[in-house]
Image (tube, grey):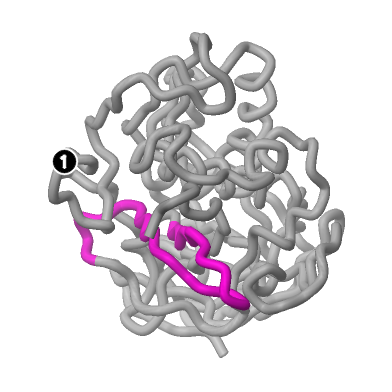
């Protein structure tokens, strides 16, 4: 069932849909639903002495801490700049590693969340390339499907956020290269101007079919892992925790991604406060007597409906250093 809301309110399609890597996800068609998100407008020193775990990640610059190896020159954003993240790790990666992490951010920001970013006006370094119009597909009164390009404010859109099941390491499963599930929570927005946009007469039905979602789940999950890892480096320093295989996982050298990265399939918790754009919570978990550092990540955490916000991703980022309590 779709959560329904009036114009100007937020709404999340309260359903988990199967989304193959290279296939089509289908679901309910047109619904008078509006989903919107506001970027955070406050700045905070997320790494001050008593900073909390709910990070706004705005206007924060960390001391130099390499992402993978010392002596590097490329800045690494904790949350990608294209998603509104401004916390950075100076000299965070080499040219080769930066090229690899750019692929991950491209999958998240420029493929999966591209239309959503256009609607919420997320930052871009290519301002001249930012679209002023976007296309959508529709049909009227059961007729043929048509495509129309409209201004961003009048554009209805669908945004999938992948979910796969919890990390295997946290559930006692063996390492594997395949996620247990390839699904997504789908957000969608239909602006109140849709009747005028389609020139609909009173009582005339219209359908907005689900688009074809093409998601590279491995790249997306590695991108989530990179966010979690950079956050942990910012908190602990590069050598103050055992990183296990996470750097290799991020760089595509370790194949068992589902063992360390995942997401619950059940309904997500409510959204965060409006001023929290993204949320990272890092804390300990004990699995089979082993203490681990586990990060929970929500992108655009302040979006959704009253009952449900975006999914919460879990990443096993490492373990306490030798001798740590």
Q: Within the magenta stretch, is there residue 35?
A: no
Q: Quadrant of the C terminus?
A: bottom left
Q: Quadrant of the N terminus?
A: bottom right
Q: Label 1, on which residue?
A: 48
Height in image: 60 above or below 90?
below
Give the residue furthest to the bottom.
1
Task: Inspect this view and state whether residue 200 appears.
Answer: yes
Q: Nearer the viewer, residue 201 or 165?
A: 165
Residue 203: image location, x then y, percent: 51, 84
Residue at 22% across, 43% down: 46
Q: Nearer the viewer, residue 14 or 174?
A: 174
Question: Does 72 sit left or right of 36 as displayed?
Answer: right
Residue at 77% across, 68% down: 182
Question: Does 287 sit left or right of 191 as displayed?
Answer: right
Residue 180: image location, x then y, percent: 79, 73
Q: Nearer the viewer, residue 70 or 185?
A: 70
Say how many tags the image has. 1
Task: Inspect this view and state whether residue 79 appears.
Answer: no
Count neighbours of disc 1 (C-alpha within 10 A) and say few if under 14, some if 14 to 19, many if 20 or more. few
Q: Main secondary structure of the magenta part?
A: strand
Q: Which type of secondary structure does the marked residue at label 1 adopt?
A: loop
Question: Does 209 sit left or right of 40 as displayed?
Answer: right
Height in image: 136 above or below 12?
above
Height in image: 219 above or below 88?
below
Quarter assignment of residue 142: bottom right
Q: Within the magenta stretch, is there residue 290?
A: yes
Residue at 77% across, 75% down: 173
Residue 83: image location, x then y, percent: 43, 40
Magenta span: 273-298
Residue 277: image location, x then y, percent: 31, 52
Residue at 28% across, 67% down: 272
């Amino acid at each position: 069932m779709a959560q329904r809301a009036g114009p100007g309110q937020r709404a999340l399609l309260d359903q988990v849909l199967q989304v193959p890597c290279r296939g089509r996800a289908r679901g309910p068609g047109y619904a008078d639903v509006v989903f919107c998100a506001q970027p955070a407008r406050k700045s905070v020193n997320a790494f001050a002495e008593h900073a909390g775990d709910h990070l706004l990640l705005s206007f924060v610059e960390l001391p130099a801490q390499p992402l993978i190896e010392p002596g590097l020159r490329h800045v690494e954003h904790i949350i990608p700049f294209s998603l509104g993240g401004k916390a950075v790790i100076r000299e965070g990666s080499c040219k080769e590693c930066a090229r690899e992490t750019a692929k991950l951010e491209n999958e998240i920001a420029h493929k999966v969340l591209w239309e959503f970013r256009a609607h919420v006006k997320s930052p871009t370094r290519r301002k001249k390339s930012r679209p002023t119009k976007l296309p959508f597909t529709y049909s009227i009164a059961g007729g043929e499907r048509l495509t129309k390009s409209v201004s961003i404010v009048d554009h209805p859109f669908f945004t999938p956020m992948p979910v796969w099941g919890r990390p295997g390491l946290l559930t006692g499963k063996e390492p594997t290269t395949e996620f247990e599930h390839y699904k997504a929570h789908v957000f969608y927005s239909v602006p109140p101007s849709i009747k005028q946009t389609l020139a609909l007469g009173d009582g005339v039905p219209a359908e907005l079919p689900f688009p074809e979602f093409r998601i590279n789940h491995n790249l997306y999950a590695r991108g989530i892992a990179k966010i979690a890892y950079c956050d942990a480096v910012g908190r602990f320093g590069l050598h103050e925790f055992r990183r296990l295989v996470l750097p290799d996982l991020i760089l595509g050298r370790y194949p068992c991604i589902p063992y360390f990265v995942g997401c619950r399939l059940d309904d997500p918790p409510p959204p965060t406060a409006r001023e929290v754009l993204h949320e990272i919570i890092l804390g300990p978990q004990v699995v089979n007597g082993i203490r681990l550092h586990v990060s929970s990540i929500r992108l655009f955490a302040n979006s959704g409906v009253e009952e449900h916000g975006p999914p919460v991703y879990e990443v096993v980022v490492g373990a306490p250093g030798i001798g740590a309590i």
